[in-house]
Image: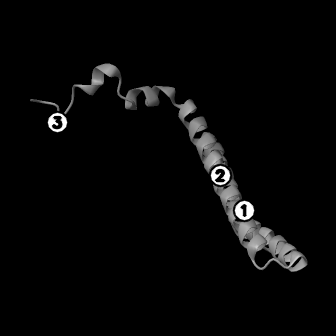
Amino acid sequence: MSDRLFDLRAKRELHSGFGDALGRGLELALTPVLFGGLGWLLDRWLDTGPAFTIALVVFACAGIFVRMWIGYDTAMRRQEDQVPALRRRIAPGPADTTSGPGTER
């Protein structure tokens, strides 16, 4: 029974991962297109050439980058907090910096 429960949880996590990836992909593709379209309309209305189009596409790409960076950092911190003993074991303490391979004289 527990194997079946584990299998269902694994499938749910897999499907959730696919949904998250699809959402991020659509966000990555559509946000600059929408901002570029808005910039193009502003450029036509104000007769400014491609200035607003370029500026808004760059702004959208920078915003997506920052959003994904913050999301990644938050997910990694959450993952690290789930295994605090592993983090303490991997990170060298002050006493561990002088011992180990390559430190012999």
- Residue bearing mark 2: 66
* Residue 14 seen by the camera: no
Q: Nearer the viewer, residue 104 or 90?
A: 104
On residue 102, the disc is: 3
Q: Find residue 33 and report its horizontal and vertical position in percent.
A: 76, 72
Q: Is residue 84 left or right of residue 102?
A: right
Q: Nearer the viewer, mark 2 or mark 3?
A: 2
How far apart marks 1 and 3 lie (CA) works out to 47 Å
Q: Residue furthest left?
A: 105
Under mark 2, the amino acid is: Val
Q: Is residue 81 above or below residue 40?
A: above
Q: Residue at x 67, y 63 (%)?
A: 61
* Quarter placement of the C terminus: top left
Is the Cβ of the residue at disc 2 closer than 8 Å to that at disc 3? no
Under mark 1, the amino acid is: Ala
Could you say whether the residue bearing mark 2 is in a helix, strand or loop? Answer: helix
Q: Nearer the viewer, residue 31 or 1?
A: 31
Alpha-carbon neighbours of circle 1 within 10 Å: few (<14), some, or many (≥20)?
A: many
Q: Residue at x 69, y 54 (%)?
A: 16
Is the Cβ of the residue at disc 1 closer than 8 Å to that at disc 2? no
The disc, 1 or 2, on the residue closer to the chain's N-terminal end is 1
- Residue bearing mark 1: 60
Q: Residue at x 86, y 73 (%)?
A: 42
Q: Is residue 68 left or right of residue 102?
A: right
